[in-house]
Image (cartoon, helix red, strand yellow):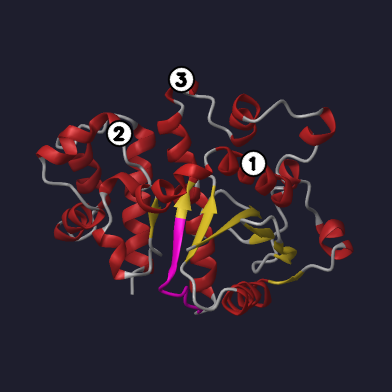
Amino acid sequence: MRFIFYDLETNSLDTSKAAIMQICMMDEDNNILMNNYVYPYDGNIDGTAIHGIDKDVLDRNSAIETETMLNQVLTGIKMRYPDEDIYLVAYNNFGYDQQVLEYNFNRFKLMIPKNWFFTDLLPYIKDKYPQYKFQYRLFNIYEKVVGELKPSEKEKLHDAKFDIEMMKALFDRHKSERYIMATRYTRSSISMQSILQYPITVMDGYDSSNRYIYIRNNIKTIGDLYDVYESIKYNDEVFDNYLKSTLYLKSNFHRKKTMNEMANIKFLLI
């Protein structure tokens, strides 16, 4: 079992369309496996106000094409860890990074290996520190758990490499629970049939406050909910009503996330 920490900077919040503009990966021994700037596949250089990446930054850092980057991810990890299960760790992995990475792989007809899994530190941190409700942004949690950031470090926020360093520091503080992270907060690629067998708790959009309502309605796995979505012929209006009236998901945020997750499975599942 090999944990690899990664972070993406992109040009959109829409995970089905977002193009990657920077990717950084680091292993448990703090080896930087890659830190590449990437020309967005759609030519749309955006999000600069957040991550500071513009065309000049891409050019100065010898940015590569998206397909080249994806192939480097595949070959680099396979060559370095040929016989190990890979756990790709990110903060808000289920809700963003995993989706973006998988849509980019799909766009170039590349397959994520079956022995690669996705681990999300965000729900782990939420369960570990419920007292910090509404303060779960990565740098907020870092300052509460690890230590205060210096002004010069705050200027690096949203740089993929620095975000990974914060993420890795959080992981190191809880390293004794790495097995828990690798089981309770991990799932397969969305493109794999096995995604349907994972517990509903690792679905993006899962509302832990409604856990007994999920159980009461026999929604124990992601596949159980996907069966409902499939049975109504993927009708978003009917499905949204089911989420409100049957699963009592009153939050627009959770319903939107859940509907997006079902749409991702419908599109990506092979």
Q: Please tell me in which quadrant of the rendered image residue 91 appears.
A: top right
Determine the CA span between mark 2 and mark 1: 26 Å
Q: Position of residue 151 (x, y in %)?
A: 82, 28
Examine the rendered structure and indicate whether residue 60 appears above or below residue 251. Answer: below
- Residue 63 at x, y percent in the picture: 79, 67
Q: Earlier in the sequence, mark 2 or mark 1?
A: 1
Give the residues in magenta.
Answer: 110-118
User: What separation in Å lies between label 3 and label 1 (alpha carbons)?
Assistant: 20 Å
Residue placed under numbered mark 2 in the picture:
208
Within-10-Å neighbours for mark 1: few <14, some 14–19, many 20+? some
Q: Is residue 71 left or right of residue 225?
A: right
Closer to us: 8 or 176: 176
As helix, strand or loop, the secondary structure at mark 2 comes to helix
Please report the residue visible at 49 percent of the width from the left and 43 percent of the height from the top: 176
Tag 3: amino acid: Gln
- Residue at 16 percent across and 54 percent down: it is 228
- Residue under label 1, please give it: 169
* Residue at the spot of label 3: 131
Left or right of 53 on screen, residue 111: left
Mark 3: secondary structure:
helix
- Image position of 108 with respect to 189: above or below: below
Q: Is residue 175 above or below residue 54?
A: above
